[in-house]
Image (cartoon, helix red, strand yellow):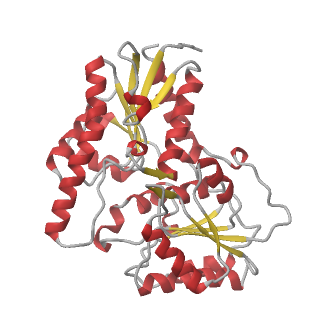
């Protein structure tokens, strides 16, 4: 094992976006930092775009730049008009190219390699940012995307098929042993993690599923409203609206604010059923063997199938857990499932842990390649 006290690894991901504390991005930052320091305990790891990275001395020996998991290489549909979407995606590409392009430029300036690990990829309509994304993967020491859909987009856009590995989200590395548990004698809990509110069909669908659980296997369950983000020191306005919706339906709802990764990990492990509109609360829920339903508020139903949440659940052979309630009627199978959830029923997911461990080995080799 190598110990190099004076070397620095720069990692770059969505946690580098200023002013936002987001559970999924901060969790991935922690995982990749830990992986790097397990490979080389003396290595200094900093996040690109932070004050700490900006303060690095000119004489710092840079080991490499790691582009870590996140969705910054795939755009979201706005669900609005073509002109609005074109302008939004153009601005999104410019912002991302400035941030992530500067990290690639840093590696080039220091003559060090970069890797890309378990990222979401495509679709990218902005041609300049698409060209950057293809170059980022094509020139990486190793490149891994987190689902087959992402691999198909990368190859379609011009990345060599032999270059692109696939590994599901590395947060699946987590296990129940990593989280302190204090569940004995406590009531069952249903966690509502809703970052936005959909239309009437969506709202009625959420209520139907929660009430089905309350009337059957989770009688007397405590309803918890979960925040996973802070923007500029405040809870996001869209999530506050979702909390108001939850309070209208279940007045005694308990609010769980987002404080930090460890706090939210512990709270998620207390849930028997998690209903979420975002990715990483669901990923972690499955890693911790919690029952999860992913019911995103979809901006453009036509592109639901290529968004990151259904991609993730397809990649672990649990596509039925992720449903577009914004345009479809409630699937009878989903209602039956909600009716059968119980405090004891938490079957083990197919986590593809071997693939995650293989990616950790690739990342460790990259970390040590210039030690």
Task: Please identify the quarter of the rendering in which residue 269 is found.
Answer: bottom right
Left or right of 221: which side holds 70? Answer: left
- Which one is nearer the viewer's eye here, 185 or 290? 185
Instruction: Determine the residue positioned at 86% across, 66% down.
Output: 185
Residue 17 image offset from top left, x and y in percent? 37, 46
Q: Is residue 146 above or below residue 137?
A: below
Instruction: Determine the residue positioned at 53% across, 84% down.
Output: 332
Instruction: Determine the residue positioned at 43% across, 55% down.
Output: 232
Residue 166 image offset from top left, x and y in percent? 41, 42
Left or right of 227: which side holds 164? Answer: left
The number of numbered badges drawn on the structure is: 0
User: Quick one: quadrant of the N terminus?
Assistant: top right
Q: Is residue 14 above or below residue 193?
A: above
- Which one is nearer the viewer's eye here, 196 or 201? 196
Residue 368 image offset from top left, x and y in percent? 48, 18
Q: Is residue 73 above or below residue 76?
A: above
């Amino acid at each position: 094992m190598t110990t190099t006290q004076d070397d620095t690894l720069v990692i770059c991901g969505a946690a580098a976006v200023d002013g936002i504390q987001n559970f999924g991005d901060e969790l991935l930052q922690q995982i990749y930092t830990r992986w790097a320091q397990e490979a080389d305990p003396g290595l200094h790891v900093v996040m690109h775009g932070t004050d700490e990275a900006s303060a690095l001395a000119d004489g710092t020996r840079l080991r490499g730049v790691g582009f870590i998991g996140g969705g910054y290489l795939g755009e979201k549909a706005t669900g609005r008009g073509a002109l609005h979407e074109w302008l939004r995606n153009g601005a999104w590409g410019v912002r991302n190219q400035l941030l992530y392009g500067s990290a690639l430029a840093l590696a080039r300036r220091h003559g060090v390699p970069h890797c890309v690990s378990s990222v979401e990829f495509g679709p990218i309509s902005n041609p300049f940012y698409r060209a950057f994304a293809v170059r980022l993967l094509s020139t990486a020491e190793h490149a891994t995307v987190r689902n087959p859909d992402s691999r198909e987009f990368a190859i379609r856009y011009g990345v060599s098929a032999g270059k692109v590995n696939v590994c599901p989200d590395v947060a699946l590395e987590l296990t129940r042993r990593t989280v302190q548990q204090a569940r004995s004698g406590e009531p069952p809990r249903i966690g509502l993690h809703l970052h936005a509110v959909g239309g009437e069909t969506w709202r009625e669908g959420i209520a139907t599923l929660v009430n089905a659980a309350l009337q059957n296997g989770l009688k007397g369950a405590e309803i918890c409203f979960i925040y996973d983000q802070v923007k500029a020191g405040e809870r996001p306005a869209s999530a506050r609206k979702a909390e108001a919706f939850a309070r209208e339906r279940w007045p005694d709802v308990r609010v769980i604010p987002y404080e930090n990764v460890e706090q939210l990990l512990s709270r998620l492990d207390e849930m028997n059923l998690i209903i979420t509109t975002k990715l990483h609360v669901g990923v972690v829920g499955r890693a911790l063997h919690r029952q999860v339903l992913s019911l995103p508020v979809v901006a453009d139903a036509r592109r639901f199938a290529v968004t990151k949440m259904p991609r993730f659940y397809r990649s672990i052979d649990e596509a039925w857990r992720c449903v577009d309630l914004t345009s479809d009627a409630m699937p009878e199978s989903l209602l039956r499932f909600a009716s059968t959830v119980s405090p004891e029923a938490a079957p083990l997911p197919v986590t593809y842990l071997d693939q995650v461990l293989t990616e950790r080995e690739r990342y460790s080799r990259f970390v040590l390649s210039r030690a």
